[in-house]
Image (cartoon, rainbow, N blue to C red):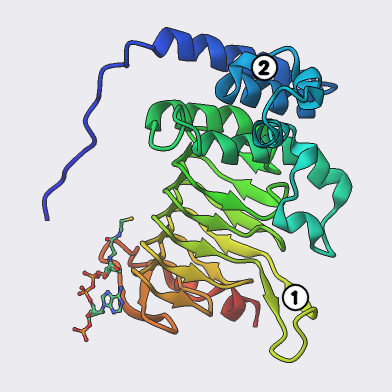
Amino acid sequence: MVKIPLQQLPPVPSRPLADRWLAELEARLADPAADRVAICRDTLVALAFPEYAGRFDAALADEAVPLATRLALSACDPRNVTLEPEAYGDCDQERFQRVKPLLWLWYSFDRLPIGGQNIDLGIRLRRVLAPHIFKRVGKNFKCFQHVEFSFGYNLEVGDDVVIHRHVLLDDRGGIRLGNKVSVSDYANIYSHTHSIVEQVDVTNATTVLHDGVRITYHATVLAGVHVGEQGMVGAVAVATKDVRPYHVNVGIPAKSVRVKPNAPADAGDRLRTSTERQN
Ligand SMILES: CC(C)(COP(=O)(O)OP(=O)(O)OC[C@H]1O[C@@H](n2cnc3c(N)ncnc32)[C@H](O)[C@@H]1OP(=O)(O)O)[C@@H](O)C(=O)NCCC(=O)NCCS
């Protein structure tokens, strides 16, 4: 293998517009009393239905506007939308309703011409939104498109974390991501599970990816699993049990196939799982 670092691309010509747009959004969100529903609605209307900016309610009531257009326009207001986790019995409605407008803005941006694979703007927008949604987010958070959450408010993110496209972070029972964690395309990190007998019998368990963990393409980490520092879960693996620090686990169920060559020689206690350490 050869080292292939990322290229430094020049800024796109519309960068000054993006800077101003993001600064305005950031300033509106900085006010703890800000009306987040209005922020979401105004932003989405300006991006998707600019002809109705400033006359949202009037347009919804205007019989001259085609019905489907009014319905589509109405979805810019998060109160007209139901998100799946909202119906979960353990959803804390007070907390969820506070983050829902920003989750809806996040998801909707990804589906507009301005969003999708517009990498630089998308990453910068998500950096603006994340601190107002997650329990905690560190510096240099880098999140690509089409990532989904359950509640959002039960997610803790360390510094220099990268989340690639189409990842599911089910933070229903809580997810903690340490520093320098990387979650690759189409991976799923769960923190809730259902009884095999009774579907409504739900167990929430916090899932923890410690510092330097890499969850690779299409892998799944089940609820309550701890992946130890610098641990790795291989492509398409299903981690059903803890992964030891510096171990590479692959397959279904994921099992250790090697210890990374950079594992500290004196790792000792660190090379045991957190469950083993408790015993
Ligand atoms: C996890 C991974 C990095 C392991 O690579 P590695 O340490 O070089 O391991 P090897 O290729 O030597 O494989 C060791 C054994 O595990 C098996 N194996 C490796 N990856 C596997 C996987 N994802 N699923 C099932 N088995 C796997 C190999 O077939 C081999 O089995 P064998 O000993 O019976 O021949 C790699 O397989 C992987 O999944 N890569 C995903 C892509 C990636 O690198 N992502 C990181 C960027 S985000």
- Outermost residue toward the right in this view: 94
- Would you identify the image quadrant in which residue 267 lies? bottom left
Q: Give the image location of residue 172, x and y in percent.
A: 71, 60
Nearer to us in this view, 62 or 213 = 62
Res 99 visible: no
Which residue does the image show at 58% across and 72% down from the upper left? 225
Query: Please, is residue 239 above or below residue 102 in the view?
Result: below
Nearer to us in this view, 249 or 237 = 237
Which label sits on residue 52? Answer: 2
Query: Please, is residue 259 above or below residue 28 in the view?
Result: below
Viewport quadrant of the C terminus: bottom right
Which residue does the image show at 60% across and 16% down from the upper left? 50
Mark 2 is surrounded, within 10 Å at the Cα level, by few (under 14), some (14 to 19) or many (20 or more) other residues, namely some
Residue type (three-letter) at the residue carrying disc 2: Tyr
- Would you identify the image quadrant in which residue 61 lies? top right
Which residue does the image show at 40% across and 65% down from the upper left? 218
Marks 1/2: CA–CA distance: 45 Å
Quick check: marks 1 and 2 in contact, CB under 8 Å?
Answer: no
Nearer to us in this view, 194 or 262 = 194
Which quadrant of the render holds ligand 1?
bottom left
Q: Give the image location of residue 102, x and y in percent.
A: 68, 35
Nearer to us in this view, 21 or 42 = 42
Q: Give the image location of residue 56, x and y in percent.
A: 75, 20
Q: Which residue is mark 1?
A: 203
Mark 1 is surrounded, within 10 Å at the Cα level, by few (under 14), some (14 to 19) or many (20 or more) other residues, namely some
Which residue does the image show at 61% across and 39% down from the upper left? 137
Res 144 visible: yes
